[in-house]
Image: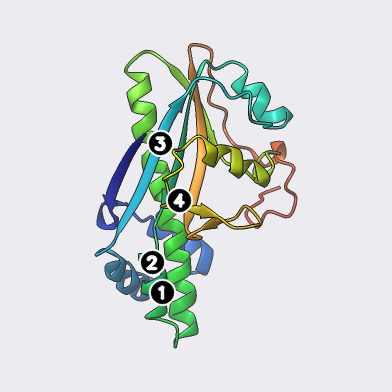
Amino acid sequence: MQSVEIKISKIPLLYEHLSNKTGRGFESEFKCISDFYNGFTARYSHIQIENVDLFNFGKKIDTVFRQCDQFEVFIATLGEAHIAAQQKFIEDPLLYYLSDIIASELIERCADMVSESIINRHVKNGSHFTNRYSPGYCGWSLTEQKKLFSCFPPEYNDVRLNDSCLMLPVKSISGIIGFGKNAKFLEHKCENCIDIRCLYRKC
């Protein structure tokens, strides 16, 4: 298992993406909050596995991974520090809300960086790759988090699961990426997704 720290200041924030969620006019607030986060670090760990028979991905993901012969699972988190950071804004509902949006954006960008780092290493060896998939999406049950976490050493405790299989700290992402000469990356399209309640659905 490899564990890596990332300075949050190194994680690129997409301010255009943030403004799409809130509307214009909050640029100065976003800048203030993101500057406050810059003193913290994110962490991620990843491990390579050869066999994914223990997982029940569901039909969609299983079809994708059936073409792969290697897999990497990862867990990324902003850690407990961001919780203390958010408490700084607890008296201001707007700033508290915006800080939560920024924290969500940061962990998504962190997961993107993790995926890119893992993929680049495999591509150098001639492998193709799939999308990254996380429990709770594309028909993969959230309860499968327990199996994903079981891939990591027992002493791993940067992130833990509650009784509902939600990750703590909450600003954390887990996932798996498949590799192999027949692996394929598939563009995510709303019409292919069964989650009709998704806030970001476009059709």
Residue 157: percent from left, percent from top: 43, 51
Vertical relation: 40 (above or below) 95: above
- Residue at the spot 46% in from the left edge and 77% down from the top edge: 96
Mark 3: secondary structure: strand
Label 3 crowd (10 A; few <14 / some 14-19 / many >=20): many
Q: Which mark is residue 86?
A: 1
78 or 126: nearer the eye?
A: 78
Q: Nearer the viewer, mark 1 or mark 4?
A: 1
Vertical relation: 76 (above or below) 184: below
**Amino acid on which disc 3 is placed:** His
Pointer 3: what residue? 46
Q: Which mark is residue 6?
A: none
Vertical relation: 87 (above or below) 11: below
Report if the CB atoms under discs 3 and 1 are less than 8 Å apart.
no
Q: Earlier in the sequence, mark 1 or mark 4?
A: 1
Q: Nearer the viewer, mark 3 or mark 1?
A: 3
Label 2 crowd (10 A; few <14 / some 14-19 / many >=20): many
Mark 4: secondary structure: helix
Q: Earlier in the sequence, mark 4 or mark 3?
A: 3
